[in-house]
Amino acid sequence: MDDIVDVISRPDLIELLLAWTGRIAVALLIFIVGRWIARIMGRQLEKALTRAHMDPTLAQFGGTIAGAVITVIALIAALTHLGVQVTSLVAILGAATLAIGLAMRDSLSNFAAGAMLMGYRPFKSGDFVEAGGQMGVVETVGIFHTKIRTTTNQEIIIPNSRIYGDVITNYSARDRRRIDVTVGISYDDDIAEAKRIIHEVISADSRLHQDPPPIIWVGEMADSSIDLWVKVWTDLDPFWDARSDLLENIKKQFDERGITIPYPQRDVHLYEEKPGS
């Protein structure tokens, strides 16, 4: 017992304990201050990204990443103050990060694509798009995947990497769309009369714009018909209804005025082979 008391009472041991107590206190202070700075910087970055009209999900994620990076820096600074050799620790963390990255490369690819989609915003929720081989209304754009509702009310979840690496068609990006339809008439019909009828149908529908003027061209002399190309502009919302009504009204007017929309037909010639030939 006397030996233990003698050892504890040694001045050098007391000095060592005091020194380590001070180091630990300073290291804790460094880490606490670092965490405080990390929270502040994370919130400020999130607010800055939000003010820059970045997607709220991406802005929040950016603030979280910034806070995590500053926290790691604070932890390394605290360990360095304690005299810990952080070189080996950083190497281990780097190797672990590489292993995790390889294991989660698909998720990281989806995340990177999601960040690009949120940054460049080729579409937003509510847009009617064709992306990733699917067509429908965008419901949500997430970090890793995008949710689309099809015209048959099916919910499809598409990985962001598949969307960003493919062609994206946004049908809602403009407030106007052009209706392009082909109308076939018989070779015996009057082309000028057919054009006048189509012009009348277009003029009678207020949803179809006169500026820019509608275009009616002879597009092709096909096997069974003369094909007229009809091109007319309309607003985005009534596009499909206007297109359907345009075709229906053209058919009705053609029927009333004797313009024929021919069926595909083919002339067949039969030759009789003479005996002995």
Image (spheres, rainbow, N blue to C red):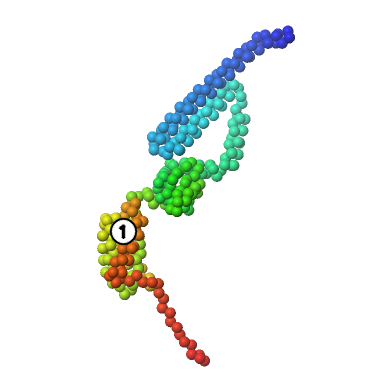
- Depth check, front residue: 238 or 76: 238
Q: Where 233 falls versus 218 (above or below)?
A: above
Are there few (<14), some (14-19), or many (20+) residues within 10 Å of tag 1? many
Residue 258 in sight here? yes
Q: Quadrant of residue 246?
A: bottom left
Q: Position of residue 53 (x, y in %)?
A: 39, 38
Q: Dot 1: what SS?
A: strand
Q: Where 43 falls versus 277 (above or below)?
A: above
Residue 164 in sight here? no
Q: Where 135 falls versus 61 (above or below)?
A: below
Q: Residue at x 51, y 31 (%)?
A: 68
Q: Residue at x 35, y 50 (%)?
A: 174
Q: Residue at x 56, y 43 (%)?
A: 105
Name the residue carrying label 1: 232
Q: Residue at x 62, y 12 (%)?
A: 15
Q: Position of residue 154 (x, y in %)?
A: 47, 51
